[in-house]
Amino acid sequence: MPSLTSMAESILARAKKLDAYLEAHNIAYPSFDDDTLGQLPDDLQDERWALANDASELKQLSRGATQNTLDYAMNWTDALGLRVVYRYKLANAVPLDGTASYAEIAATSGLKEDLCRRFIRLAMGSHIFIEDVETQRVRHTASSRLLAMDQGFSDAVGLETDDLGPASSKMIDVWAKYEQSVSEPDQSAYSMFNETNKPIFAFLASQPERARRFGSAMHHFTKGDSWDLRHMLAAFDWPSIDQPGAQVVDIGGGNGQISQYLARHTTHVHYLVQDLAHVVSQAPSLLPGDLKGRVEFVEHDFFAPQTMEPPTAFILRYILHNWADKYAIRILQNLIPAMRKGTKVLIYEYVLEDGPVTNLSGRFGFQMDAIMATTFNAQERTAAEYERILKEADSRYVVEAVCRPKGSTMSIIHVGWTE
Ligand SMILES: C[S@@+](CC[C@H](N)C(=O)[O-])C[C@H]1O[C@@H](n2cnc3c(N)ncnc32)[C@H](O)[C@@H]1O
């Protein structure tokens, strides 16, 4: 491990680069009131995340083994504070550009004044709200203001603290009740916590507000540049298949979001979106007029074998990570009747590192993995794990490349067929 001084010097060097840009462009230094680092250009965004990673390492070292581990163990208290803030809409009880007393927040939110004070002060430990030292009135920080103003952000916080987090408390009970290799989506921690024998989406179908929040939160999580669909263009040589007669089948393609995007970036390919009946019955009415004929929808359950002629390629985006190996293998096996030499299977997923990740941004994969375990008894996978389930599905599947374009969160696994 480098010395504390050399770690601090690395932090200093990075901070100086960021400050220099801010000063040259008359942008204020970041504060908890104003998160100005969003205005940095792309190359300095990388520097910014590196600074956060270095600072986090230094913080953990200086906290020491005992305290650092206890910080981790007591994360639940912060999640509880945020959950109370979310549930009682405490951010909306503080004027955007003014202040509120705890009594006023209590009157607006319906949460008792002493609970408002205790839980808002807990959240203040993470710079969510700030209290005026003399008047003890509360005003916003950048974080609490976002909670009040940005519905998608608030929904994302709500989904994590008020839905998935509490449901995860049942994970170990699920392993004890069923088995550690449990793979049924209706035996998930989410289902057990919600006392239902339905899998998550069937359960949410009867809970419109929670379903709305789920969709809105997913939209929020996937809206940054690293999720941009342009990365999908860079992750595969689309011109190589863009020939007259080419067809791409979008398995579980929903309303055809990626087929529509790809149709606009190719000339000849016809896109066939397969999904369940209730999705396919709605999707065509949402299709822009100029794509009619290029993108079509057809009902097909991916747990049934394909009956179509072999297409040029299948694409599966955000499908396999929702299923345990047993089911993911079945989905892959059901493509086989429509596979021939040259047919590609393009798997668009997060590909996990095959080892521990300590940098803050990279931890996302393991956090997603925990979410998949909690909600579906499913998992994120490493490249080797994708290769293994493909081989278990059929030895003729062969992984040709795993491509993650620079700046992209997601990868495309290119799979060929050897027969
Ligand atoms: C996480 S969404 C991904 C949607 C789309 N691939 C995308 O990337 O935007 C999963 C999709 O799988 C569909 N789905 C779930 N079970 C299915 C099944 N048995 N057969 C076909 N589609 C299914 C859902 O309706 C949903 O559209």
Image (cartoon, rainbow, N blue to C red):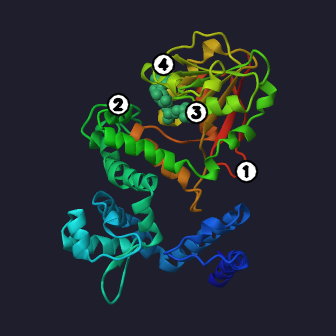
- Marks 3 and 2, how far apart at CA: 22 Å
Q: CA distance from mark 4 to mark 2?
A: 16 Å
User: Residue 329, how many percent across, how many down?
Assistant: 54, 26
Residue name at image x 29 percent, y 57 percent: 87
- Which residue lies most toward the bottom here? 134
The residue that label 4 is drawn on is 301
- Mark 3: few/some/many CA within 10 Å (<14, 14-19, 20+): some
Tell me whether the residue at label 4 lies in contact with that at label 1, contact meaning CB atoms closer than 8 angstroms. no
In the displayed structure image, the side of residue 88 where residue 275 appears, left or right: right
Q: Secondary structure at mark 3?
A: helix
- Mark sitting on residue 257: 3
Q: Position of residue 9 (x, y in %)?
A: 68, 82
* 96 w.r.t. 173: above or below: below
Coordinates of residue 126 in the picture (x, y in percent)? 42, 72
Q: Position of residue 32 (x, y in %)?
A: 49, 75
Q: Disc 4 residue type? A: Asp
Label 1 packing within 10 angstroms: few (<14), some (14-19), many (20+): few
Q: CA distance from mark 3 to mark 4?
A: 19 Å
Q: Is residue 64 left or right of residue 307?
A: left
- Residue positioned 64% across, 25% down in the render: 291
Kind of residue indicated by mark 2: Ala
Give the alpha-carbon distance from disc 4 to disc 1, as whole Å. 34 Å
The residue wearing badge 1 is: 406
Marks 1/2 in contact by CB < 8 Å: the verdict is no
Q: CA distance from mark 1 to mark 3?
A: 22 Å
Q: Give the mark nearer the N terminus: 1 vs 2.
A: 2
Q: Earlier in the sequence, mark 4 or mark 2?
A: 2
